[in-house]
Amino acid sequence: MRIQFNTDHNIEGGEGLAAYVDAIEDKALRHVSDHITRVKVHLTDESSNKSTPHDKRCVMEARIEGHQPIAVTEEASTADEAVEGAATKLCQKGRSSHRETAKSGESRK
Protein backbone atom coordinates (compact mmCIF):
# COMPACT_ATOMS: atom_id res chain seq x y z
CA MET A 1 0.00 0.00 0.00
CA ARG A 2 1.38 3.37 -1.04
CA ILE A 3 0.40 6.48 0.92
CA GLN A 4 0.54 9.86 -0.80
CA PHE A 5 0.45 12.70 1.74
CA ASN A 6 -0.17 16.35 0.84
CA THR A 7 -0.71 19.52 2.86
CA ASP A 8 -1.62 23.05 1.87
CA HIS A 9 0.76 25.94 2.46
CA ASN A 10 -0.80 26.66 5.88
CA ILE A 11 0.17 23.33 7.44
CA GLU A 12 3.75 22.32 8.06
CA GLY A 13 3.84 18.74 6.83
CA GLY A 14 7.21 17.52 8.01
CA GLU A 15 8.47 13.99 8.44
CA GLY A 16 6.90 13.69 11.89
CA LEU A 17 3.40 14.40 10.58
CA ALA A 18 3.93 12.09 7.60
CA ALA A 19 5.06 9.27 9.92
CA TYR A 20 2.02 9.89 12.13
CA VAL A 21 -0.30 9.66 9.10
CA ASP A 22 1.40 6.43 7.98
CA ALA A 23 0.95 4.88 11.44
CA ILE A 24 -2.73 5.87 11.64
CA GLU A 25 -3.40 4.52 8.14
CA ASP A 26 -1.64 1.22 8.84
CA LYS A 27 -3.69 0.73 12.00
CA ALA A 28 -7.03 1.79 10.50
CA LEU A 29 -6.74 -0.15 7.24
CA ARG A 30 -4.94 -3.26 8.45
CA HIS A 31 -7.92 -5.51 7.62
CA VAL A 32 -7.95 -4.58 3.91
CA SER A 33 -4.35 -3.44 3.39
CA ASP A 34 -3.58 -6.38 1.07
CA HIS A 35 -6.19 -5.05 -1.36
CA ILE A 36 -5.38 -1.34 -1.17
CA THR A 37 -3.12 -0.03 -3.89
CA ARG A 38 -2.92 3.60 -2.77
CA VAL A 39 -4.20 6.02 -0.13
CA LYS A 40 -4.22 9.75 -0.79
CA VAL A 41 -4.29 12.08 2.21
CA HIS A 42 -4.93 15.82 1.81
CA LEU A 43 -4.62 17.96 4.94
CA THR A 44 -5.68 21.61 4.80
CA ASP A 45 -6.22 24.52 7.15
CA GLU A 46 -9.48 26.11 6.04
CA SER A 47 -9.05 29.33 8.02
CA SER A 48 -5.43 30.00 7.12
CA ASN A 49 -3.65 31.79 9.96
CA LYS A 50 -6.73 32.17 12.17
CA SER A 51 -7.52 29.57 14.80
CA THR A 52 -11.18 28.59 14.60
CA PRO A 53 -12.99 25.44 15.68
CA HIS A 54 -12.94 22.65 13.11
CA ASP A 55 -10.69 24.50 10.68
CA LYS A 56 -8.43 21.53 9.88
CA ARG A 57 -9.77 19.29 7.11
CA CYS A 58 -8.47 15.88 6.16
CA VAL A 59 -9.67 14.19 2.99
CA MET A 60 -8.63 10.57 2.49
CA GLU A 61 -9.15 8.45 -0.58
CA ALA A 62 -8.36 4.74 -0.74
CA ARG A 63 -8.05 2.82 -3.97
CA ILE A 64 -9.00 -0.79 -3.41
CA GLU A 65 -8.41 -3.46 -6.07
CA GLY A 66 -11.55 -4.10 -8.11
CA HIS A 67 -13.57 -1.29 -6.47
CA GLN A 68 -14.37 2.34 -6.94
CA PRO A 69 -12.21 4.62 -4.77
CA ILE A 70 -13.53 5.32 -1.27
CA ALA A 71 -13.25 8.91 -0.04
CA VAL A 72 -14.02 10.51 3.32
CA THR A 73 -13.65 13.95 4.90
CA GLU A 74 -13.14 14.94 8.52
CA GLU A 75 -12.99 18.43 10.00
CA ALA A 76 -11.48 19.01 13.44
CA SER A 77 -9.69 21.55 15.61
CA THR A 78 -6.25 19.98 15.10
CA ALA A 79 -4.50 18.23 12.24
CA ASP A 80 -4.04 15.08 14.35
CA GLU A 81 -7.76 14.92 15.17
CA ALA A 82 -8.69 15.44 11.52
CA VAL A 83 -6.35 12.62 10.40
CA GLU A 84 -7.60 10.22 13.09
CA GLY A 85 -11.24 11.00 12.35
CA ALA A 86 -10.79 10.55 8.61
CA ALA A 87 -8.91 7.28 9.13
CA THR A 88 -11.72 5.97 11.34
CA LYS A 89 -14.32 6.88 8.72
CA LEU A 90 -12.22 5.30 5.96
CA CYS A 91 -11.84 2.14 8.02
CA GLN A 92 -15.61 1.91 8.52
CA LYS A 93 -16.31 2.50 4.84
CA GLY A 94 -13.62 0.00 3.84
CA ARG A 95 -15.07 -2.69 6.11
CA SER A 96 -18.56 -2.02 4.77
CA SER A 97 -17.37 -2.22 1.18
CA HIS A 98 -15.40 -5.41 1.92
CA ARG A 99 -18.48 -7.06 3.51
CA GLU A 100 -20.71 -6.07 0.58
CA THR A 101 -18.25 -7.58 -1.86
CA ALA A 102 -18.06 -10.80 0.14
CA LYS A 103 -21.87 -11.04 0.30
CA SER A 104 -22.31 -10.38 -3.42
CA GLY A 105 -19.69 -13.04 -4.17
CA GLU A 106 -21.56 -15.56 -2.01
CA SER A 107 -24.89 -14.78 -3.66
CA ARG A 108 -23.44 -15.45 -7.13
CA LYS A 109 -22.49 -19.01 -6.20
Image (spheres, rainbow, N blue to C red):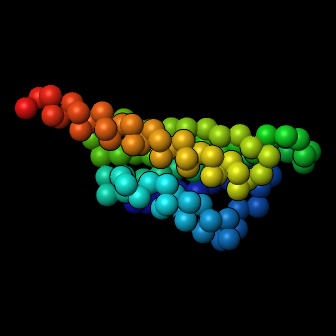
Provide residue 55's location: percent of width, then percent of height. 80, 41
Name which residue lies at 41% across and 42% down: 94
**Apparent side of residue 85 relative to residue 69 in the rendered image (left or right):** right
Residue at the left extreme, as displayed: 109
Name which residue lies at 54% across and 63% down: 22
How many numbered badges does the structure rendering display? 0
Provide residue 76's location: percent of width, then percent of height. 74, 43
**Apparent side of residue 12 relative to residue 73 in the rendered image (left or right):** right
**Apparent side of residue 8 relative to residue 3 in the rendered image (left or right):** right
Residue at the bottom extreme, as displayed: 15
Name which residue lies at 54% across and 41% down: 89
Q: From where the camera sits, is residue 67 visible?
A: no
Provide residue 96's location: percent of width, then percent of height. 39, 37
Q: Quadrant of the N terminus?
A: bottom left
Provide residue 85's location: percent of width, then percent of height. 63, 46
Q: From where the camera sits, is residue 103 visible?
A: yes
Q: Is residue 97 above or below residue 87?
A: above
Q: Is residue 14 above or below residue 104?
A: below
Residue at the right extreme, as displayed: 50
Q: Is residue 74 above or below residue 2?
A: above
Closer to the camera in the image, 87 or 47: 87
